[in-house]
Image: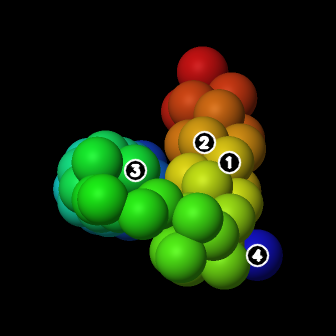
Amino acid sequence: MEFSKEELLEARRQIGSILHKLEETIKTLEAKENPERYKSQLTLAKRRVKALHIADTLISRELA
């Protein structure tokens, strides 16, 4: 599937926004009184961050 440069740039912008929100969520959950209680949410958020970093890297390669 082919994507225009504009579509790829917009995707990177959206990924950046989502990453920022997820990273803030992780900080908030880790700062809670009992972070172990949120273990599954933290694991999911961290996996999503990793997946989005991979997507961002692949988009960067495509733009290069």
**N-terminal-most mark, 4 or 3:** 4
Location of mark 1 (residue)? 50
Decide: few, some or many residues near mark 2? Use Cα within 10 Å; few <14, some 14-19, many ≥20.
some
Query: In the rendered structure, which disc, 1 or 3, sits on the residue that comes first in sequence?
Result: 3
Q: Earlier in the sequence, mark 4 or mark 2?
A: 4
| Residue 24 position (above or below residue 25) | above
Circle 2 — which element? helix
- CB atoms at circles 4 and 3 under 8 Å apart? no
Which residue type carries mark 1?
A: Lys
Residue type, numbered disc 2: His
Q: Nearer the viewer, mark 2 or mark 3?
A: 3
Query: Which residue is more in the foreground, 4 or 54?
Result: 54
Name the mark on residue 30. Answer: 3
Q: Residue at x 28, y 48 (%)?
A: 31
With 35 as the anchor, is 42 left or right in this view?
A: right
- The kind of residue on which mark 4 rests is Met
